[in-house]
Amino acid sequence: MSRIALDIRRITPTIGAEIGGVDLSQLDDSRFAAVRQALLEYLVIVFRDQDLSPADHLAFARRFGDLEPPHPVFAQLPEHPQISILENRGNQGVYNDEWHTDVTFRACPALGSILYARLIPESGGDTLWSNMYAAYDSLAEPVKRMIGGLTAVHDISGGGPYGRVPSYREIVLARPDGRRRLHDIETEFPPVSHPVVRTHPETGRKALFVNRSFTTHIAGVSKLESAWLLGMLLEHVEQVGFQMRHRWRTNDLVMWDNRCTQHLAVADYAPAPRVMHRITVEGDRPVFQSETPGRAA
């Protein structure tokens, strides 16, 4: 199969690309293969002016693999429960306004997330992404040696190490049946451990894999050591040089590789509403390989 050349415009030299001239509802196998390769190369891919039904959105997502079951906290489209509704009404219900990687509370976090813009404020509401390959690569060698092989605990209700914004726990407890629902969620999703440095299963590259929303502490070290080391890594990954920023328009679709990125939805658009539809693709269990034969580290 010959390789298809896409119309690609880099967003920054480090992360992100906008791909033009593609109708995601009419994607043949050759063009899809090129799109998947672009995801691996640029980590975040942006498609403007996509006129997609929920069925089209699902069909595109399924080409990357099996889809995750309905999100335990977000609302869903009743007829398509694997499509989460991320709805913010000004300051009501803001829960993504910090750097995070999606669903790392799962034993096998998502391969990728596919976000489709349905209602966009006239100003504000951008999303930022950060490249976790670049974050890892820029660490000093002694720090790389220190964190290689360490594991960290991720908890759906932990709210991360600092609790700067409402956690899923607070969001669920605010609902009428919140206490019962929280018990069910915490039973279904007990805390899990993932490597602090993850080896990407397709590229073989290493990426930092801790985030503010779900990573509560580093295992096997003291509380003081965990607080210092995790705090340093979380500040490190948020440097502007690793980032891109996307200004949304209605009918934009953005997909990102959840295995090597973090993102933040900027909550600066009150009192305007913002509504997005999100699908997540099932991933695999994160692993750390100190050496990856046949691949670049």
Image (cartoon, helix red, strand yellow):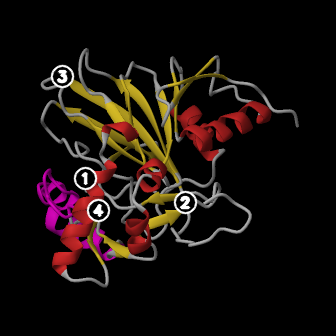
Q: Nearer the viewer, mark 4 or mark 1?
A: 1
Does label 3 or label 2 sit earlier along the sequence? 3
Q: Position of residue 270 (x, y in %)?
A: 13, 26
Q: Nearer the viewer, mark 1 or mark 3?
A: 1
CA gap between label 1 and label 2 equals 26 Å
Residue found at x 53% / y 21%? 50
Residue type, mark 4 in image:
Phe
The answer, for residue 177, to whether it is visible in the render is no
CA gap between label 4 and label 2 equals 17 Å
Residue type, mark 3 in image:
Ala
Residue that numbered label 4 is attached to:
214
Q: Nearer the viewer, mark 1 or mark 2?
A: 1
Q: Secondary structure at mark 3?
A: loop
Q: Position of residue 91 (x, y in %)?
A: 12, 35
Q: Secondary structure at mark 2?
A: loop
Residue found at x 65% / y 56%? 202
Residue type, mark 2 in image:
Gly
CA neighbours of label 4 inside 10 A, class few (<14), some (14 to 19), many (20+)? many
**Labels 4 and 3 touching (C-beta < 8 A):** no
CA gap between label 4 and label 1 equals 15 Å
Q: Nearer the viewer, mark 3 or mark 2?
A: 2
Residue type, mark 1 in image:
Glu
Residue 272 is marked as 3
Which of the two residues, 96 or 99, is positioned nearer the viewer here?
99
Question: Is residue 184 found inside the magenta-colored segment of the image?
Answer: yes
Does label 1 or label 2 sit earlier along the sequence? 1
Does label 1 or label 3 sit earlier along the sequence? 1
Residue that numbered label 2 is attached to:
283
Residue that numbered label 1 is attached to:
235
CA gap between label 3 and label 2 equals 34 Å
Q: Is residue 225 above or below residue 168?
A: below
Q: Position of residue 286 (x, y in %)?
A: 51, 68
